[in-house]
Image (cartoon, rainbow, N blue to C red):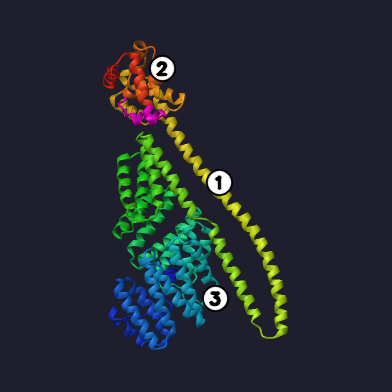
Amino acid sequence: MRTIIVLLCLLLPAMVVAWPGQTDFLTVLKNAGKEERLPIARKIYNDQLIHLDSTQAFVALNRINQWATNMHDIPLKIFSVMAMGDYHKEYYSNQRGGKALEFFTTALNMATQLDLKESEAEIYNNMGWLYYKQDKFPQAFEYMIRANNIIQKIGYVHYPYASRYLYDLGYIYCDFGNYEKAKLYLTEAIRYPFNNSLYAVRTLNTLGLAYRELKQYDSAILYFNWGLDTARAIHNIAWMGILSGNLGTVYYFLKQNDEALPLLKTDYELSMASKEWTSAANTIIMLADLDLDKHLLPAAALKLSEAQELIGRQTDRRPFVYYALQKARLFKYLKRYDSAFIYLDTARRVVNQLNQRRDALVFSQAEQKVAVELHLSEIKLLESENSKMVLVRNFIIVVILLVLIIAAQLIFRQQLKQKKNKELLTNAVTQLHYYIDSVREKNQLINQFKQEIEQLQTQPEQYIVLQEKEEIAAKLKQYSILTESDWNEFRNLFEKVQIGFFSTLKQRFPDLTPSEQRLLALMKLKLSKREMAGMLGIAPDSIKKTRQRIRKKINVQDDMALEDLVASI
């Protein structure tokens, strides 16, 4: 039954058109009826022109534009200009985003003058995507919502690209973490036919992601499977990989590793073959996570090394957070606690940066601005009446409307303030939980470190192997001795490596102060003056002065003789 639904979902509402090759597209348009030209031109662009290099693509689009001008086919002319902007948006959104905006603005002016609402909505949607790709989120949502206002007036059922538009809006809300609103638009999208079967796959995948993030796993599995069936039907290798991985992730969250493992491996293989680096990176990290569960440390280390290389091939920072957490976990098992701390702190910083990007107020700001402009345009229409009586009546209406708008704005601002406070509280609680988890992880590492030290203290010398001594010596060189507590921990560790050092020092040179003993201990570790100063929290010049005092006390001529003496203890 599901297969039948998939096939029905993918039926193209427009006539399926075939043409011999990319050089003959204009002949196809000339032979088509006027109502058929725009759907055919759209299909030519999506299937052929978007995949050409910029020179070929713009030659083709200019030919369509010129022919449409000669034929007085304004909708086709507007589409050709918009397609030029779309090409720039897809390939040059960061480098030459201004050029895309110029094309979109030109097309929008033509559509607005002729009151072509379908074209207006499509152009607004494209402008929203352009701003979104440039990380200009308030503008992106503003133009998306403008498009939505137009489409709602037309009616989704009458708008030929409703499924594509609803997917675009749903995807952005999902990307911003507003999964409930994403579900609303994406569920609406699958009610309408898709002009492009690839968008059916994307919609089903994004809907599955929204349900997965909401931990509604049964629904997530349903939509991921549906999307996977659709990807297989159109033989799209990249999406077969991505959807396999997303489905495997759900089983991973459910601790059903036997079901998860083959799906994740399929995702990695297909994503690598189709150069989907983000998907491949996420999947190889998850496979490393499974290796760590089984304490297969060399296998996990190898996979994380592959993940690091893949992360460098793409710009999405989210896979790095997962990578950093797994690296911290690996170093914890390897007892390299300092490295584990570094990766935990790095993951926390990146998470905070990503959270700042997802400022929930961007939605309400865009919605508020469009709503105000809508009210002002309606008032303008009232003021354009010619009759004096109508003007008087309209003045009264305008006053009433303004009072209502002011009251509504006051109420809206109060609600917005309450919503903002709630969102800030929710965000603070989330960050606090993350911070507590991070601190708890660090405390576990510290406690484990201390237990190992205590265990070493209870064992006789013959059980302390050379490798453990080297590990302790390496840790000593990274200590900060700023408090008496720090010194006591340092001294306990130091005595494990240099047994009897302090007792010998006290016997031979009883007049040395505690600070002078500390300096000699650091000299025993062969540290530089700058390193010793950093550990003790003092200036390098203070190290020099302390060494001079020590030389006078123990009657040593120069620093070289002092270092030889320390080495002999």
Task: Please determine whether, in this image, residue 157 is positioned above or below residue 478.
Answer: below
Q: CA distance from mark 3 to mark 1?
A: 40 Å
Q: Earlier in the sequence, mark 3 or mark 1?
A: 3
Looking at the rendered structure, the kind of residue marked 1 is: Val
Which numbered disc, 3 or 1, marks the residue closer to the eye?
1
- The secondary element bearing badge 2 is classed as loop
> Quarter of the image holding residue 367?
bottom right
- The secondary element bearing badge 3 is classed as loop
Q: Disc number at residue 513? A: 2
Q: Residues within 10 Å of mark 3 (few under 14, many from 20)?
A: few
> Foreground: 558 or 297?
558
Tell me residue 154's x, y (percent): 54, 77
Task: Please determine whether, in this image, residue 184 is positioned above or below residue 563.
Answer: below
Looking at the rendered structure, the kind of residue marked 2 is: Thr
Q: Which residue is mark 1?
A: 429
> Foreground: 256 or 220?
220
Q: Residues within 10 Å of mark 1 (few under 14, many from 20)?
A: few
- The secondary element bearing badge 1 is classed as helix
Do we see residue 500 in this rendering?
A: no
Do we see residue 46 in this rendering?
A: yes
Q: Residue at x 71, y 75 (%)?
A: 397
- Residue range in magenta is 525-541
